[in-house]
Image (cartoon, rainbow, N blue to C red):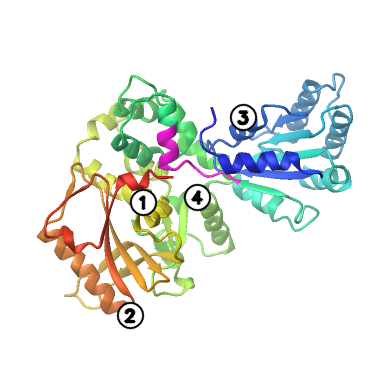
Amino acid sequence: MLIGRIKEQERLHKAVAEEESTFVAVYGRRRVGKTYLVRETLGNCFTFYHTGLAKSTMKKQLAAWRLSLREYGMKNAKTPKTWLEALDMLKDIVRNSSAPKKILFIDELPWMDTQRSGFVSALEHFWNGWASARNDIVLIVCGSATSWIISKIIKNHGGLHNRVNVKIHLQPFTLHECEEYASHRKLGMNRRQLMECYMVMGGIPYYWSKLERGYSLQQNIDNLFFAHDGELHDEYGALYASLFKNPEPYIKVVHTLGTKKIGMTREELINEGKIPDNGNLSRVLDDLETCGFIRKYNSFGLKAKNAMFQLIDSYTLFYYRFIEGNIQGDEHFWSSQASSPFYYNWCGLAFERVCLLHLLQIKAALGISGIVSNAYSWRSIPKQKNETGAQIDLLIDRNDQVIDLCEMKYTKDPFEMNSEEDEKVQHRLSRFLSDTKTDKAVHLVLVSANGVKRNAYSDEFQSIITAEALFHE
């Protein structure tokens, strides 16, 4: 059963219903469900279906193409010598089909573009010189290497420029969709467990599909990530290798960003991460943002050139905090850490990331969905030794002359505001007002994972949002 993806399904069905041939690109990170979406939506009714081979040679790619041609009716197909020849052979498959719409699905397309293969130019020739002139072809290309799909297909400056009719960037599940999925699979998880699972895995459907009924969440995480034969034990390396042909620069940037909660400027990345300052860094940052691993944002009141880059991928954060730190190879590492201060410190950080990924739900809870607004972070650096800095991880600058300063708290029990916490909040508010000199009204907002214990201090907040709001559509 396909959970969610309503808009994406509608776009695929519309592409098939068009009166002319349609070029569709489906892309997104590894394990997000791209292939499953296409198969389930179109019912495997393909005139031709092929999947590229990971890290393989052109010769082997073409041999695999021949096997797919045979699978779909060309019983005597020989191995083509070039991609021009290979795609020319595909024309016969189309000509022999009686289907009103010939759906051609080429999965993991980036893997087929081996060095000096001429694959992209051959695809251009196939589409521009033949397929687009017909009115009965739906060409669907798919791949995890998001940056490749965008640069070589969607933003192609050659023959494929503006040729893609439908672009579907498949995003991870929201908390609402994960709850729906867990309910469908009868995993028996309450919302607190769903939240914790999301903080570990993010909204990656494939990871969630590996959770087993009958086991606790702690047991499942141990079995998947920490057991030596766990299905996701080696996921980190495979994840970045599947997305980027040369993953090392990407991993270095992500690892460096993982050391700072609020993120870094480009200059800080270069200096603290010892990352070369060249054009490649810009491409790496753009690719990581496109793939959803980092977010780029402006710090409130500063120019765009001072933009911050922040690691936001839940699984990567979990990997750095726990899997990479499991030096002893403890197969029950998660269960042993579940009540430790280290665990709760991570929970606070991970919950903030979940909030940032559910900004639409926070705005809805504030009743400002229809108001134009921008999200920022902000920090104040002490100018003198006796001064204390301040940091706000999320503020919402609204067009109705209000700024919401959001405090995000993850606690085991309902959050209880006390004098110490109130002093910290008032200090941040005071520094923000004095440093920014804003003339807008400033509201304090509390987002609490497990509710709030009402007292005199909690009344300082104009709005209180619980985790329940994050589970809304």
The residue carrying mark 2 is 439
Amino acid type shown at disc 3: Glu
Q: Nearer the viewer, mark 2 or mark 1?
A: 2
- Distance from disc 3 to disc 1, alpha carbons, whole Å, reads 30 Å
| Residue sitting at x 22%, y 62% | 461
- Distance from disc 2 to disc 1, alpha carbons, whole Å, reads 27 Å
The residue carrying mark 1 is 355
Residue 179 lies within the magenta run: yes
User: Which structural element holds mark 2?
Assistant: loop
- Distance from disc 3 to disc 2, alpha carbons, whole Å, reads 52 Å
Left or right for 394, reference 139: left
Q: Nearer the viewer, mark 3 or mark 1?
A: 3
Q: Position of residue 110 (x, y in %)?
A: 67, 42
Identify the disc placed on residue 40: 3
Identify the disc placed on residue 282: none
Q: Position of residue 96 (x, y in %)?
A: 88, 27
Tell which circle, 2 or 1, labels the residue nearer the N-terminal end: 1
- Distance from disc 2 to disc 4, alpha carbons, whole Å, reads 34 Å
- Distance from disc 3 to disc 4, alpha carbons, whole Å, reads 24 Å
Q: Nearer the viewer, mark 2 or mark 4?
A: 2
The residue carrying mark 4 is 292
Tell which circle, 3 or 2, labels the residue nearer the N-terminal end: 3
Please report contact status of discs 4 and 1: CB closer than 8 Å, yes or no: no
Residue 222 lies within the magenta run: no
Q: Nearer the viewer, residue 140 or 368?
A: 368
Where does the magenta region start and end?
Answer: 169-180
Tell me if mark 4 has few (under 14), some (14-19) or many (20+) residues whose alpha carbon lies within 10 angstroms of its own: some
Q: Answer above or below: position of 225 versus 469.
A: above
Q: Nearer the viewer, residue 81 or 71?
A: 71
